[in-house]
Structure formats: structure tokens, C-alpha cells
Amino acid sequence: MHNIAVLLSGNGSNLKAIIDKGINISFVASNNSKALGLKIAKNANIPSYSWKNISEFEEKVLKLIIEYDVKLLVLAGYMRLLSKNFVNSLPSKFIVNVHPSLLPKYKGMNAIKQAIDDCAEYTGVTIHYVDEGMDSGSIIKQNSIKINEIDTVETLRDRLQAIEHCLYSDTIKSILIKD
């Protein structure tokens, strides 16, 4: 059985989708003690941790990765850039992330709003490995959708999240199978 760990900052909708797909999660950690995702983890009997101080957060997560023999670190709405030291202390292709755009377009925060403001015809979801940069790691999988004229940030976010919840879990499973 392959163990993953999940880092999150918010609601935990991708965490819930991963749990629902039956992927074994060793622990969940957050930089936000009020993140709803921590409640989802607790309700699923998954150990959860939270530290606000970012250097303490990264130090503790590294120790937990070793303790739990984690094979893949999954960012699921983790809204901070991981430090260069943290990323480089782990093996290459050890950290994955999901992003609501067709990278390399619309990196960082507000990607959905960026796509709408740019009058883009298409956007989508990208699953990628994490490196030292902002949404710059190698792309694993992408899925695109047409932006409708009536789309708002909220309606487009909902449509993209539906894709994320399937694509991310399936991609995580396929990475673990290769391992």
C-alpha cells in the first residue's frame, strides 16, 4: 500500500475527492488551523496537523514524511509557495499539485479570473510536479474546457473543480501504480 500526505490551506474539496477514491492518506497538514479540510481529515480518521509558522511547518512535515514512509506529497489547495530548501530536500517528482488553468498560462493566484479577464476561449486543469517556481514544474496531465460567455469566476470554478476531483485522484493513482 502506497502512502500519500496532503497539504492544504482551505476547504478540502480535493482532499475529500481523494479520500472518496480510496487512496491511502497517511496524514494531512495545513498552514491554516481553521481550514475546513482538517475537519474532513479528522472525520476520516486521518491524522492532521497544523502549524502557522512556515519554517516550523516545513520542518515538521519533512519529519512526518519520513515517519509515515510517504511516497507522494500532494498539494490540495495549499496556498503557499514551498521553500527551495523544502523542495530540494525531497526526491524529484515527489510533490504534485493541481492548478485551475492550462499551465503555463495563468500561473499563481486568481488563475480563473485571469482567464476570464483575458477573454480566453479555453481553460482547464493542470496536474504538475512541484519544483522551486510558481506553477512551473513539469506537467503530468491536463484537461481543457471551453469558457462559456455566461461564465463567472464562480461558475467556471465549479466546472473546473468537478474536473479536478476526478483528474487529480486518477493521476495520483497512476503515479502510485508506477512507483
Image (cartoon, rainbow, N blue to C red):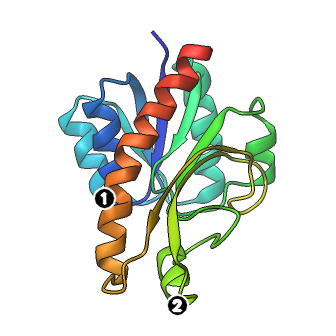
Task: State the SS at label 2.
Answer: helix
Amino acid under disc 2? Asp
Q: Is residue 57 left or right of residue 92?
A: left
Q: Residue at x 67, y 32 (%)?
A: 94
Query: According to the image, label 2 marks what residue?
Result: 117
Q: Is residue 10 visible?
A: yes
Q: Position of residue 137 (x, y in %)?
A: 74, 50
Q: Where's residue 10, x and y in %?
A: 37, 60
Tell me if mark 2 has few (under 14), some (14-19) or many (20+) residues whose alpha carbon lies within 10 angstroms of its own.
Answer: few
Q: Position of residue 54 (x, y in %)?
A: 61, 58
For image coordinates 81% across by 40% down, the residue present is 88
Q: Residue 9 location in percent, x, y? A: 43, 58
Q: Quadrant of the C terminus?
A: top right
Kind of residue indicated by mark 1: Asn
SS for callout 1: loop
Q: Is residue 141 above or below residue 78?
A: above
